Image (cartoon, rainbow, N blue to C red):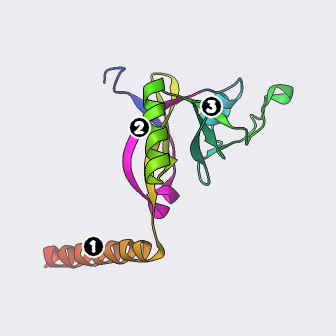
Amino acid sequence: MSPEKKSAHIADNRKAYHDYVIEEKLEAGLALKGTEVKSIRQGGVNLRESYATVRDGELWLVGMHISPYEQGNRFNHDPMRDRRLLMHKNEIQRLYGIIKQQGLTLVPTRLYFKRGRVKVEIGVARGKKNYDKRQTEAKRQADRAIERKLKEQGRD
């Protein structure tokens, strides 16, 4: 596999797909300090309750938890600090316009390594209502039932 296509999966934010309808996905770099990358390599990261926001023309990831590195002693950083996302200026301005005009939000959906760098997949998302969540769950259960019936018919 070529180095450009190689990516190592770190974490998913499955709750984002439950609470939001993801309309568009974008890739952003993540500015990290010292021992945070080592902790991420050990799997000490949680995307659940995190979101992205635009502040002073920069994109920030808020609420992502990176556990302190065990061998990091005094060099560890605050696990809940806001982390800067790296994107082109024109992409950030476009996202800012979208979230201000259409009332959408930016949620991280996936964290992964790409060519040795930590990347975040950001989803432009619209919040689901409770009835939307129920419809999604009902559809998922119906699909499971259909798959089960097809599997049973295939055995006969």
- Residue 16, magenta (yes or no): yes
Residue at screen point 71% across, 23% down? 34
Span shown in magenta: 10-30
Residue at screen point 60% across, 39% down? 61
Q: Nearer the viewer, residue 23 or 136?
A: 23
- Residue 147, magenta (yes or no): no
Residue at screen point 14% across, 73% down? 154
**In the picture provided, is 82 more to the left or to the right than 95?**
right
Q: Which mark is residue 56?
A: 3
Please, what is the three-letter code of the amino acid marked with disc 2? Leu
Q: Nearer the viewer, residue 104 or 115?
A: 104
Q: Which mark is residue 143?
A: 1
Secondary structure under badge 3?
A: loop
Q: Which residue is mark 2?
A: 26
Q: Position of residue 122 (x, y in %)?
A: 47, 42
Q: Residues within 10 Å of mark 3 (few under 14, many from 20)?
A: few
2 vs 3, front mark: 3
Instruction: Report if residue 88 is visible in the image.
Output: no
Which image quadrant for residue 42? Answer: top right
**In the picture provided, is 113 more to the left or to the right than 45?**
left
